[in-house]
Image: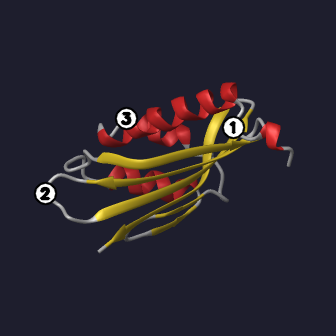
Amino acid sequence: MNRDNIDRQAILNEVTAAFYRYEQALVSNDVDVLDELFWEDARTVRYGATENLYGISEIRAFRQGRSPKGLDRTLHNTTITTFGEEMAVTCTEFTREGSESIGRQMQTWVKFPFGWRIVAAHVSKMG
């Protein structure tokens, strides 16, 4: 890939806005926005800290059954990298108040005609 197509500012701005929209929806438990931002497809994958979810149906069920308590978190070392106009990877670490544990989150985003969507996500904890 031509280096000029990596982190083009306009595309980086779009993905950054989508990423922080997701983050706000996550900490406020806005299930509708969380659902919207995942690709509506059976091939969408989300590996969580304690669960492996295959397909949008499993991801939706997880979101709808999750407690809205204790979702606030502080992000650290967030990186967002875009490749061309239609693909991006976001990586961040996070901590939660009262916990020494460091969480990690990676997402692969793809731009569809209807907007940016997460096609794969991985969340894990260190210690």
Q: Would you place residue 13 above or below residue 68 in this image?
A: above
Look at mark 2 in the image and give the residue it sits on. 98
Of the numbered discs 1 and 2, the one sitting upstream in the chain is 1
Relative to the observer, which residue lies in front, 99 or 9? 9
The amino acid type found where label 2 is placed reads Gly
The amino acid type found where label 3 is placed reads Gln
Neighbor class of circle 1 (other Cα within 10 Å; few <14, some 14-19, many 20+) is some
Q: Are marks 3 and 2 in contact (CB under 8 Å)?
A: no
Look at mark 1 in the image and give the residue it sits on. 7
Q: How many marks on residues?
A: 3
Q: Would you place residue 46 above or below residue 12 in this image?
A: below
Numbered disc 2: secondary structure: loop
In the image, residue 66 lies at what x, y percent? 31, 54
Q: State the residue at coordinates (26%, 66%).
A: 101
Numbered disc 1: secondary structure: loop
The amino acid type found where label 1 is placed reads Asp
Which picture quadrant has residue 49?
bottom left
Relative to the observer, which residue lies in front, 68 or 58? 68
Q: State the residue at coordinates (67%, 59%).
A: 43
In the image, residue 58 lies at what x, y percent? 50, 59
